[in-house]
Image (cartoon, helix red, strand yellow):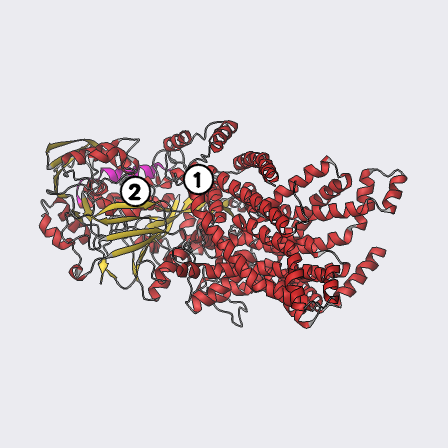
Amino acid sequence: MTGYILRRLVQMLPVLLLASFAIFAMIYAVPGGPVAVIVGENASQEEIAAAIQRYGLDRPMVVQYLDWLGRALTGDFGLSLHSRQPVLQLIGERLPATLQLALAAIVVALVLGVPVAIASAVKPNSWLDRVLSGWSALALGVPTFWLGILLILLFAVELRWLPSASRHVPFWESPVEALRSLVLPALTLGTYVSGILARFLRASLIGEQRADYVRTARAKGVPERRIVGLHIMRNALLPFVTIVGLMMANFIGGAVVTEAVFTYPGIGRLLIQAISTRDYPLIQGCILIILVAYMLINLGVDLLYAWIDPRIEYR
Amino acid sequence: MTKLSRRQFCMTGLALGGALSLVGGLPAGAQQLKGGTLRVAVLSELANYDPQQLSTVNFHVIKNLYDSLIEYTPEGKPEPSLATAWTISPDKTSVSLTLRDGVTFHSGTPFKADSVLATLQKGADPKRGKNVFPTMSIVKDWSAPDDRTVVINFKAPVPERQILDLLQFLLPIDPKGIDMVETVPAGTGPYTLVSRAVGQGLRLKANPKYWRPNQPVMQDLVFTVFTEDAAATAALESGAVDIVYGGSSRSAVRLKNGGYQVFAGPGPLVQVFRINSTRGPFRNKSFRQAFNHLMDRASILRVGYAGMGQEVALPWAPASPAFDAAYTKTYGYDIEKAKKLIAASGLSADEMKGWKLLVNGSDEASVSISQIVQGSLQKAGIPVELDMRQGAEYVTALLGGDFAATFGAVGNVQKFPSRVATNSIYRTSGNPVLKDPHPHPDYVAAIAKVDAATGSAAEVKASYDNLNKVMVEEAFGVPTNSYDVGLIVASDKIGGITLDIDNLLVARTIGFK
Amino acid sequence: MTGLAAAGRLLRRLLARRGAALSLAFLTVVGLAALFAGLMPLDPLRQNIAESLKPPSPDAWFGTDELGRDILARVIYGARTSLVTAFGAVVIAALIGVPVGLVAGFYGDWRDSILMRCIDVLLALPNILFAMALIAVLGRSQGAALVAVGVAGIPGFARIARAQVMALRQLDFVMAVRGFGGGPAYIMFRTILPNALSPLVVQAIVLASIAILLEAALAFLGVGVPPPTPSWGEMLRTGKSYLYEAPSYAVLPGLVLTLTILSFDTIGRALTAIIDRDETDGVRETAGGGR
C-alpha cells in the first residue's frame, strides 16, 4: 500500500513539470504584460524600462522558466509581481477559505441530496420519484449565479438577515460570523451538488437493489430498512465517494462563479485576478496548487475505494 | 474673482499664527466626540509607507502617519501645519518656511530643518522622488539657515499657487528612517503603526506625543482590506466596520438613502474621453471638436456615477483656480452641432469609421459610459465597435498609447492648473499617446504660459482662460464629468470628518458621537 | 431514408414524455424568437436613459436596463448569442473530440494512452478556468467565447466515441468490413461512426445545455461576448449590481436562461432513457462546469 501511494506521488511529478512549462508558455502567449499594471498608466518610459529590468522580464522565456523552476524546487514560488508578497503566502490565505466553502457545500449537498436519492430509489418511477427527479434536475440546471442572485435578493436585500457579500471568517474563530458568511454561497453551490448526488446515488441504489445479494437478503427476511441502510448503502458508497471527491477537487479552483457572486475570497478568484493583472508567479502558483489538489484528492478517492470495498486492491 | 483675491491675501499673509489656526482647524463639536476604535473598510491593499508615493492605494494611511508642511482647506485656502509660516519673496523665486517647535517623529527624533532637507533631497532624486519628483522640477536648491527655518529657491519666478502646491505635497520624513520608509513608516503623524497583515489590513494606534491638541480622537485605527465594493458595503451595513473609504458612488447614493453619512472631498477625478489625435479621422481638428458635443454628459454622470459629481467640459474640479462653468454650457451635448462640425471636417463616411472605442472592461462605469457614447456616435452617423480589454491588457494599451479613443480618468485637477500635465494624455513632452513632437503646440504653449504667469491676478486669469480655450479647440481630451474618489461613507455614530484637498483619509478628527 | 425514419420514431417517443415535450416546445419558441427577432418591433440597442431601470410594464414587459434599453428585446437577441455559441461549441467539440476518441479507442495502444492523458489534463483543470485562460489569449469576442466553450466540450465527445469504438470494433459486421480489406480510416468513420451516432447525438444535446451555461458564466465573469451585444450572462452580471434599484433586471433574464438549460437537460435525459445509455457517463463533464 505504501509503495502504491509513493508510486502515485512520484507519477505526479512529470505531469506537474509539464504543466508548469505549459503554463509558462501560455502566459507568454497572452497579450499585455504585468509591467503596465505595476507602474501605472502615467509612468514614463524610464520607469517602464526600470521595472522590466527589476523583475527580470527582459530575459528569454526559457531562462525565466528555469530560474523559476530552480527556486520552486526548493519550495520558493517567488513573490507576486503586483503585491510583492510571497505567492505561497497569498495562496495560503485563500486556501482555507476555499476549503471551508467546499466542505460547507458538500455538507449542504449531503443533507439535501441523500434523502432525496433514497426516497426516490425505494420506489423507482413512483410519483414521488418523479417529483424528486424533477427537483434534482432543477438543482442541477439552475445556474449558480442566478440562484445566488435570488438568494441575495431574498435574504440580503429584502429580509436583511444575511450579508449580500461574504468574507472569509475561519469557523473556529467565530462560528456565528463564519456561518453568516457561508450560508448563502454554501447553499448555492450545495444545491447544485445535491442535484448531481441525488441523480447518481439514485441510479446506483436502484442498480444495487437488483443485485443478487439484496434478493438473497430479502428472501431471508432481513428487514427492508436494514437492507437499504446496510447492504445497499454500503455498496452504493463507491460512486458516491467518486462524486464527492470529484466535486471537492473541482471546487478548489472551479467555484469561481459562486465566489464571484458572493465576492468570496477563494483560490479561483485569486487566479482570475492574477490572470487579469498578468501576475506571472501568482498564476503559476495558483494553477499548480489546483492541479496538486486535484491529483491528491483523486488519490484519496482511490484509497477510500480500497477501504470501503476490500475486493479492490492496489499494488 | 472674490475667491482669487482671498487666496491672494492668504498666500502673502505672514505668520498665520499656529495657535489661531489650531483653533480654526478643529471642527466644531469635536470636544463632544468620544474615542475608541475606528474600523475602516478600504478597497485597496496598501503599496508601501512612502509619503512621496501618492497613489490612491496609499490614500488611507498617508495623512494618518505623516503631516504636510502646509494644508489646504477644502476651498483651497492654505493653512499652517508643520510649517507655521511661509514667506514668498517678492520676485517669487524663493520661499522661506518657519518650522513648528516641539514636534517629534514616531521614533522620538525631534522635528527640525534637517528632516525637511532630507525630504526635499529624496523628492528631487529621480529614483526616489516618485510622485513628488515632477513637482520638484521648479526647485533650484534649498538651505537651512537654522534649525527652525528652511529656504527653498526656484529656477525662475513661480506662481504662488504652484509654490503652495509644492509645500502641501511635502510630508517631512524622519531622516533616520528615510531609506527604509517604504517598509517602516517614519512620520510625525497622529497615529503610529502597530501591525500589518498583508492582504487583510493594518492596525494603528494614537501617537501619544502628537502635536495637535486633543487629537487624534480615536485611540485605535483598524483598516480592513476588501477586494470588492459590495463586500465593504455589506460590512458597513452589518456593523463590522464604521466607515467605508474609497467605495463607489453608486453604493454611496444607496447608503445615503439608507441613513448613512456620505462625505465627498474636494479632490475628485475627471473622466476624460481621450482621443489619439495622431490617428485616422482624429487628425482632423473639426472632427475632434465634434466630440465636445457628442458627450451626453448628463447621462454619463447619471449612469456611470449615480449622479455624484459634476458635468464638466474642462479637466478641472470646482476647487481648481481654472474652473470655469461657462464652458460646460457652451460645449454641451448637442448632436446637431456635432453633425455640423463633422460635416465641416470634410471627411467621407468611410474615413470616419474604421476605429474602435477602447474600453476598460474591468471598470463597470467605463463599460456603461462607453456604450452611451457609442449610442451618441450612432445617432451622429458614426457606427463604431467597442474594444473591451481587461486589466493588464487595457493598461498596456493605455501606457503605449495604442488606441484610437478611450475613457480614462485624470487626477490633480484641483491643484495648480499645469499639474494636469502629469496625466499621460495631457503630458506636454514624452506623451505616450500623442508622441513627440507634440501635435498640439498651442496647448504646450498654453501650459508654459500658465507656468510663467507670476504677475497680477489679471495676468494669471488670462493664462487660465487661454489654456481653457486651447483645450476645447484642440479637443484631444474631452472631459465629461468629475467624480468622487476616496468617498467616505460613515455610520451615523461617526462625527468629526475632515475633508482633505486630495481626498486622503484624515482620521485624527474622527470620533464617536 | 432509414435515418430519417429513425429520427421520426425517436421524436414520437420523445413527445410522449410530458417533460420532454414541454421542453421541446419552449426551445422551439426561444429558437424561433431568436431567428425572427429582426421582424419584431424590438431594438436591443436603443437607449433611453430617462427611462432607465424601470420595472416591468406594458411598454417594456421585462422592464428596462441601466441605459433604458428594453430588457425583453435584449433577452430575445441574447438567445441568438446563447444558441450560436452553443451550436458552434458543439460543432467544435464534436469535430475534435470524436476523431480523438475514435482513434484512441480503435487502436487502444500508445495512441490511446497519449490521447487520453491529454484529455485527462483537460479534465483536471476546471473547464471554466480553462475557458477563461483561452479567452485571455484570444481576446474577448463571440468567436473566442465559442472556441473556449467548444474546447471544454472535447473530453465528453472523446470519451463517448472511444467507449463506442471499443464496444463495436470486435462485433461481426466490423470484423467483416475489416475482412473485405477496409482501411482503419474507412472502418472508423464509415462503419463504426454511423452506428455510434445516437449516444453522440445525446452527448451533443447534453453539451448544448452545458455550453449555454458556460457561455453565460463567462459573460457573468465579464469575459464573454463583449457589449453592447446582448447576452444573458452579461445581463445577469450587470443586473446583479442593480439588485437594489431594479430587482427584476437580473431575475427575468436568469429565468429564461435557466429554463433553456433545463429544457436541453430534460431532452437529453429523455433521449438517454430512450436509448438506454448509462447515466454515470455524464458525471465528469457535468462536474464543475460554470459553477
The picture quadrant where one finds residue B133 is top left
| C3 lies left or right of C30 | right
Give the residue displayed 32% in from the left and 45% down from the top.
B196
Query: Is label 2 on the same chain as label 1?
Result: no
Q: Nearer the viewer, residue C20 or B267?
A: C20
Q: Position of residue A11 (x, y in %)?
A: 60, 36
Q: Chain of mark 1?
A: A
Residue at the far right: name it. C180
Q: Is residue C66 visible?
A: no
Label disc, if present, on residue A79 of the rendered structure? none
Q: Is residue A128 visible?
A: yes
The picture quadrant where one finds residue A207 is bottom right
Q: Position of residue A232 (x, y in %)?
A: 67, 61
Within the magenta stretch, is there residue C112? Answer: no
Give the residue displayed 72% in from the left and 64% down from the top.
A217
Q: From mark 2 to mark 1, how far is it between C-alphas?
A: 26 Å
Q: How many marks?
A: 2
| B396 lies left or right of B131 | right
| B275 lies left or right of C111 | left
Q: Chain of mark 2?
A: B
The picture quadrant where one finds residue B442 is top left
| A65 lies left or right of B194 | right
Give the residue displayed 72% in from the left and 36% down from the top.
C111
Q: Nearer the viewer, residue B433 or C76?
A: C76
Q: Is residue C209 above or below residue A124?
A: above
Identify the amino acid type marked 2: Leu
Tell me where the magenta segment starts and ends, as one range. Answer: B440-456
Q: Main secondary structure of the magenta part?
A: helix
Task: Residue under label 2, please give it.
Answer: B54
Task: Residue under label 1, please give it.
Answer: A87
